[in-house]
Every structure is written in C-alpha cells, then in structure tokens.
Image (spheres, grey):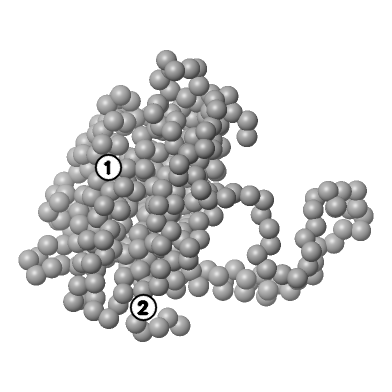
Amino acid sequence: MSPPVAMYEPASTGTADAPIPTAKMAAIPHTTSVPVGGATKPQTIDEMAGKWSDFRFAPIRESQVSRAMTRRYFADLDQYAESDIVIVGAGSCGLSAAYVLAKSRPDLKIAIIEAGVAPGGGAWLGGQLFSAMVMRKPADAFLREIGVPYEDDGPDANFVVVKHAALFTSTVLSKVLQFPNVKLFNATTVEDLITRTDGSGNIRLAGVVTNWTLVSMHHDDQSCMDPNTINAPVILSTTGHDGPFGAFCAKRLVSMKHDSLPVLGGMRGLDMNAAEDAIVKGTREIAPGLVIGGMELSEVDGAHRMGPTFGAMALSGVKAAEEVLSVFDQRRAECAAPEDKGFRVGA
C-alpha cells in the first residue's frame, strides 16, 4: 500500500553508408544483456548449439510468472503515481523527447503513456506502407546521436534515408526503455487532465487521468469504470493530429475553455517545406504545465501536415525536451503550493 504522504526521492540513477560519429549525449552503454541477479551460470548460444535433443527450459510454476509480472507492474504504478514528467504518446516525437530528457536529467522520473499496445505511432513504416524513412537535414544529427545508419547522397543532398522506418523506431524505443528513470505504460490512455486553479482563477496542469485503453473504448457500452491518476508538474503531449486518441490534450484544453487555447487552429493541407519548420519552431508550453510537440501542434496552430517525412518529429522531440526543462523548476514549485501541502512532487 502506498504511504499516506509521499516524500520526494530522486530516481536512481549496424553498418552505415554514412559515418556515425560518437555524439556528445551518447553516454549510456548499450551492451549485451546480462542477468541482473541469480546464482546459475548463464549459457551462451554457442554452448547450446547441436545439443537440442537433451534441451530443457528451467522448471517453473505458472504462479511464478504471474507474480513476476504483477509485482513489478504494480510497483511501477506506485512509484510513478507521482512523476516529474508525463509524456502522452510514444510516437517518434514523444520517444525522441524521452531520450533527451532521460539522458539530460537522470534524476527525474519520466512516465510515458501510450494508448496502443505497440509504441511508435506511425513511425514503423514510411509513406503509404513503404519501408524507407526519409528525414530532411539537419535531422540526420539525431540519427547519428542514437546510432541509426542511413543513406546520404552527399553534402549537397537535402535529406537522408533510413532503409526501414522500423530501424529508427526500434532503436530509439530500446534506448529509451533502458534508462532506469523511465517507465512506459502502453495499452493505457489519457482520459483527462488533472488541473489546479490559483487565487486569480488561472488554470494550470498538474497531471493526467488514465485508464486501460480497452476500458476507455467501452465506456459507452459498459457501466461506469473509473480511472487512475498520475500527478506531475509538467506534461508533454505528443498525441499526433486529430483522430481517435489524437490531439487529445489540445482538444481537452478547448473543451474546458482554457484561456490559452479557446479554439483549435485545425490542420492545413500537406506542405512539407512549411510544415516541418512550423512544427519544430512552434513546439512550446501551450498552457502552464503543458508542452505540446509533434503533429498535435498542427491542430493547435493550424499548421500544414507534412506527410511521409519524419525529421520534424525527431527535432520537435528534442526541442520539446528543452521546453520541458526550461519550465520544470517553476512548475514543480507551483505544484508544491498550499493545495498540495504534505506531498512532495516527484516522490
């Protein structure tokens, strides 16, 4: 059971056609996995080779599997009920932001909420279900940062090509999930926002309201199924353009009649040149405690859609991380205001 008062404790801390230099931020090791505990000597694949007739897995009881999963998951729910940053949406923008945030601030607890079972949004394929991913320069800097190889036609070329979009998405996802201060809650959706109102009537964001995605999809045909909550001083919303779960936080600001966003701008037609610049430049704090990045911004600002080019998603994520950190201390102090007395933010 959670303690009645949460006290603050910082989180514990391929072959390429183009050369991939070591980036300044690339410090976390990504080496061969090894057991984290246990007494038995691990076998290698080479040691197993040719010995399949006598092969056996280690014995197990079904309840051991159940307890191994549920114990860890509910411990994570308890730990991240008070987070420092919540990222809504684990697409290319949200994951890029999570990577930069987790590396820059290993002391912060970062919860990622993803409605789908599979994180990555639409970045598992390029346009029209094609494999290759196109990124306009200078977004190739982020590819080098995370170690994704790409094809580059030289200094005069204005874009690079990753041979399969899944190579980018799986790489950034795997790196994000290896950080000890990040937890991804997938198959989980944000149903609402937690708000606080100051003495002047100004509304700021203070967390998210969550539920299982499958539950959220059946509110209309089942009895009331109440949600869960995560408190956090800053939310980064990267839920994409309008759709079943898209542009959620932007649409919720409008529906609650928040002064910062009285109406949606509405996404304009496709214009790659205009769209990508606008998304990166426009990534910002939209309301106190809410930063919006990626294609969700197109609904906020009335920006153009960009189609099958992904550089703006990565660099909007990088800029979103900067925007989050630029306001974090102020928003954390505000979340320690009198109405939250007795609770330490991020505990």
Q: Nearer the viewer, mark 2 or mark 1?
A: 2
User: SS class of the residue under badge 1?
Assistant: loop
In the image shown, does 227 or 94 lie closer to the viewer? 94
Horizontal side of 86 relative to 130 (left or right) equals left
At x 12%, y 54%, the residue is 259
Comparing 150 with 87, the one in front is: 150
Crowd band around label 2 with a 10 angstrom C-alpha radius: few (<14), some (14–19), many (20+):
some
Using a 10 Å C-alpha cutoff, classify the residue at mark 1 as few (fewer than 14 neighbours), some (14 to 19) or many (20 or more). Answer: many
Task: Residue 59 in the image: state x and y as whole percent.
Answer: 79, 70
Disc 2 + disc 1, Cβ < 8 Å:
no
- Name the quadrant containing residue 281: top left
Residue named by callout 1: 283
Q: Name the residue tied to disc 2.
A: 7
Q: Is residue 37 above or below residue 242?
A: below
Residue 155 drawn above or below residue 340: above
Residue drawn at point x = 55 percent, y = 49 percent: 174
In the image, 6 versus 193, the foreground residue is 6
